[in-house]
Image (cartoon, helix red, strand yellow):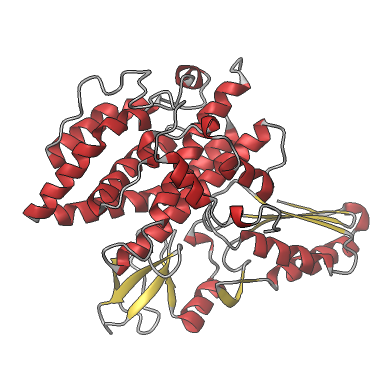
């Protein structure tokens, strides 16, 4: 849902690019270097003149990092040239799911954190050798990660799940 | 919709307070559960229940015409008088017995999953949105409770302890399965597709089949001060539980969090 201020024409389009870049620069506190946009948290950007509304969705309802992420996004967008007012809200819908993680996000989780992403009930691939993994514990070191074991290389790995 | 605001508020509080206190009870096992996986599981499950409580308290704030800031939600969660809470006896119940904690987890999450599913098509859209999110998370809770119970039922001593735990919790199930005096109106208005009590026959059959424990006759009768089915009374365990939750808050009431 993007609304561009048509009165501004090309200027507004480039402002939106700048705003999106600013949001993109914010990383998940649990995965430094991985943008919240690649994790699928950004749902909407609305721009009216210099007033920006950002709509985010939480990975899960009890996430303790929500206030921190919203503050970071607000500060980054407010620093964009041409923006005079920013509001960041956590939307009630749609519900987040691992399917929202982008290809770039999956690659970064795999190479930087050896974390696999589980889509639905599919078998996540081992980030180290690509082999099939088996769930060992539904709950891991944080709320959105379970613990799997790779059948092929026997490595224990973390899996981001819904 | 001619449903009074009070009805919706009471209905939301019944669920929110259950989620809040259940979440707290789970978190109190972190570090002292029988094995590491359980510490982790209860940390995550407790976190989910607290998240669900926040979603529901936000809706209560909106009904009250108050902006749902952290302070406003804290005021609802920690700042009401005991008589203003609408929790059921089961979530207030203090236990240091792991079998009772596990039996409560199994019962609570089975009922909670159904409570959210009754709200997924709610005529009250913000509640329907919350239900869709919560239901996704709940599937893990039920799967976890089931897996643990299934493993333990293979061991005769564990089976005995679980059966005893279920027997001690039975009188509290009626209160969990009744969401206050307005439920008929809530269902009539399309807020929920069924009353919480709709789960009772299935729950009762499950418990008898799996654990060999019968629910007492007339356990859904109300009002009953013993079962607190109308959710107006707090049990003796409520005050110490609230005191533990408020312990840090009470150290300095003027502190900025």
Q: Is residue B216 left or right of residue A112?
A: left
Q: Is residue B236 left or right of residue B173?
A: right
Instruction: Identify the image quadrant of the N terminus of chain B.
Output: top right
Is B214 rendered above or below residue B37? above
Residue sitting at the far top = B2
Quarter of the figure with residue A77: bottom right
Which residue is located at x 54 percent, y 27 percent? B10
Residue A120 seen by the camera: no
Q: Where is residue B136 drawn, in percent x and y?
A: 43, 49
Residue sitting at the far front = B251
Q: Where is residue B70 drawn, in percent x and y?
A: 66, 50
Which residue is located at x 19 percent, y 37 percent? B167
Seen from the viewer's position, the closer of residues B103 and A83 is B103
Seen from the viewer's position, the closer of residues B74 and B123 is B74
Residue B10 seen by the camera: yes
Which residue is located at x 25 percent, y 78 percent? A151
Which residue is located at x 72 percent, y 37 percent? B66
Is A31 rendered above or below residue B18? below
Q: Is residue B189 left or right of residue B94?
A: right
Q: Where is residue A157 drawn, in percent x and y?
A: 36, 77
Quarter of the figure with residue A75: bottom right
Is A122 rendered above or below residue B245? below
Q: How many marks?
A: 0
Q: Where is residue B112 drawn, in percent x and y?
A: 38, 40
Seen from the viewer's position, the closer of residues B232 and B184 is B232
Instruction: Identify the image quadrant of the C terminus of chain B.
Output: bottom right
């Amino acid at each position: 849902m993007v609304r561009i201020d048509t009165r501004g024409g090309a200027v507004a389009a480039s402002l939106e690019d700048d705003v999106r870049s600013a949001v993109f620069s914010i990383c998940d506190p649990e995965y430094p270097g991985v943008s919240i946009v690649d994790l699928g948290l950004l749902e909407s950007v609305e721009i009216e003149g210099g007033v920006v509304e950002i709509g985010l969705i939480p990975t899960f309802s009890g996430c303790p990092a929500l206030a921190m992420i919203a503050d970071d996004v607000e500060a980054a967008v407010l620093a964009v040239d041409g923006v005079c007012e920013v509001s960041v809200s956590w939307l009630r819908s749609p519900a987040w799911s691992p399917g929202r993680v982008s290809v770039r996000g999956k690659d970064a989780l795999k190479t930087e954190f050896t974390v696999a992403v589980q889509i639905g009930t599919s078998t996540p691939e081992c980030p180290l050798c690509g082999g099939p993994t088996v769930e060992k514990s539904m709950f891991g070191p944080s709320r959105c990660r379970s613990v799997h074991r790779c059948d092929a290389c026997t490595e224990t790995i973390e899996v981001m799940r819904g | 919709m001619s449903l009074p605001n009070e009805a919706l508020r009471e209905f939301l509080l019944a669920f929110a307070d259950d989620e809040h206190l259940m979440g707290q009870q789970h978190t109190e096992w972190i570090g002292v559960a029988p094995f590491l996986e359980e510490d982790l599981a209860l940390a995550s499950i407790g976190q989910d229940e607290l998240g669900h409580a926040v979603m529901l308290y936000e809706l209560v704030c909106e009904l009250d015409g108050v902006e749902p800031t952290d302070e406003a939600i804290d005021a609802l969660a920690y700042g009401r008088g005991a008589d203003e809470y609408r929790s059921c006896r089961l979530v207030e119940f203090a236990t240091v017995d792991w079998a009772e904690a596990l039996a409560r987890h199994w019962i609570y999450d089975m009922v909670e999953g159904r409570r959210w599913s009754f709200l997924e098509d709610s005529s009250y859209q913000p509640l329907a949105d919350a239900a869709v999110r919560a239901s996704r998370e709940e599937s893990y809770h039920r799967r976890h409770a089931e897996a643990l119970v299934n493993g333990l039922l293979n061991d005769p001593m564990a089976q005995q302890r679980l059966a005893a735990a279920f027997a001690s919790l039975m009188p509290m199930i009626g209160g969990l399965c009744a969401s206050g005096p307005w439920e008929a109106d809530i269902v009539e208005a399309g807020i929920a597709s069924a009353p919480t009590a709709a789960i009772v026959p299935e729950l009762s059959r499950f418990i008898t089949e799996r654990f060999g424990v019968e629910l007492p006759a007339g356990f859904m009768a109300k009002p009953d001060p013993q079962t607190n089915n109308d959710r107006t009374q707090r049990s003796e365990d409520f005050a110490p539980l609230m005191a533990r939750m408020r312990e840090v808050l009470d150290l300095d009431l003027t502190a900025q969090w």
